[in-house]
Image (tube, rainbow, N blue to C red):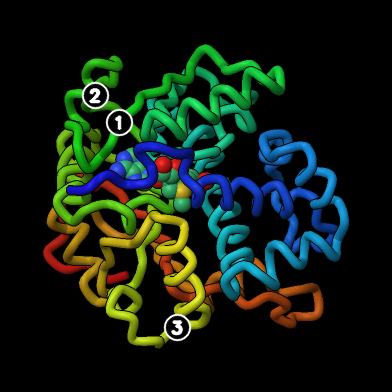
Amino acid sequence: MSERRIETTTSRTAEWTCVSRAASSLESDSCYRSDDRIALQLVPTFLRVLLHIPLIRRFCCQVIAPKGIYEYTIARTKYIDGIFKEVLAKDFDQILIFGAGFDTRALRFQAETGDTKIFELDVPITQRSKLDQYTKRGLRIPANVKFISIDFDRESLSEKLEEAGFVSGQRSLFVLEGLVMYLQAESVDETFKVIERFAAEGSEVVFDYVRGPVLRQEGMYYGEREIFKSVAKAGERWNFAIEDEELEQFLKSYSLIVNDRKCGRDLEQLYFTNASGDIIGRVNATHCLVRATKPASLPAESSV
Ligand SMILES: C[S@@+](CC[C@H](N)C(=O)[O-])C[C@H]1O[C@@H](n2cnc3c(N)ncnc32)[C@H](O)[C@@H]1O
């Protein structure tokens, strides 16, 4: 495998996601507003100032950005925030955030975290730059949070977790937000095998995937051409996708069942319907969000 951009420079897609969350935290419309005020502290000062201007915010996030990707990022943040809060309320033992980028949940939800341990995993350069930003902005890292640097395509996840004190057989939430599409198929397989091996019954996984036809560039989905070009331009091309109809079987092969799956239109209904019942934002439809559980035993047939 040749050298990839994420080995030498902070992940551009992680930076862009952080900018979107920062922008979204400033929106006045509740459909567009999400709660990540810490993201706002992590973006460069000049950009923070500019993002306060609605026209510039719109230009950055909705005019030059791939169609519907701002809306998708907002919906994904809200969806995963909801699950994060739910598992904290249920006193899960551990939360693992794979490909964490500039995810700020460990800080944003520290009041609710209790004894839950949080592990954040990402490539060294991106992780370093996030930690540098935390230091620069005076953001204190809670004692329950551990950072593990790893390249999922080149290093052993199970060894890294064991070294870091991850305890297997405990009830855990695994968050893979905007990650699996960037990995090699073998690394995705290895990651899900580790989840299968290490997670106790009742553990949950939340992740998103790129839909099969997108990788084949069939032009089926809203915003497809723009986002495909844009990630390739960022030097972080997509390698992995799942066919919608194969999702259930994919998860079953790792002893997981699908609890919920939300794609473009579902996310519009859920997050972009205003008080009058009108949909006010279109969501990029190239991805789907999935919530899965490790049950005590797998049912013979399950449906989404
Ligand atoms: C689109 S960003 C998402 C970041 C974060 N989850 C979020 O939603 O804000 C993709 C993240 O995956 C990480 N990533 C991509 N390939 C990786 C690999 N081979 N090993 C570890 N991390 C990787 C990048 O460094 C980046 O932080």
Which labelled disc corresponds to residue 160? 2
Q: Is mark 1 within 8 Å of ligand 1?
A: yes
What is the x, y in percent for residue 88?
A: 51, 33
Which labelled disc corresponds to residue 150? 1
| Residue 173 visible | no
**How crowded is the residue under tag 3: few (<14 C-alpha within 10 Å), some, or many (20+)?**
some
Which labelled disc corresponds to residue 119? none
Name of the residue lying farthest toward the top: 143
Nearer-N-terminus badge (1/2): 1
- In front: mark 1 or mark 2? 1
Q: Is residue 248 above or below residue 49?
A: below
Using the image as rendered, state which of residue 46 and residue 173 is in the foreground: 46
Residue at mark 2 to residue at mark 3: CA–CA distance: 37 Å
The residue beneath circle 3 is 221
Nearer-N-terminus badge (2/3): 2
**How crowded is the residue under tag 2: few (<14 C-alpha within 10 Å), some, or many (20+)?**
some
- Residue located at (74% from left, 56% from top): 33
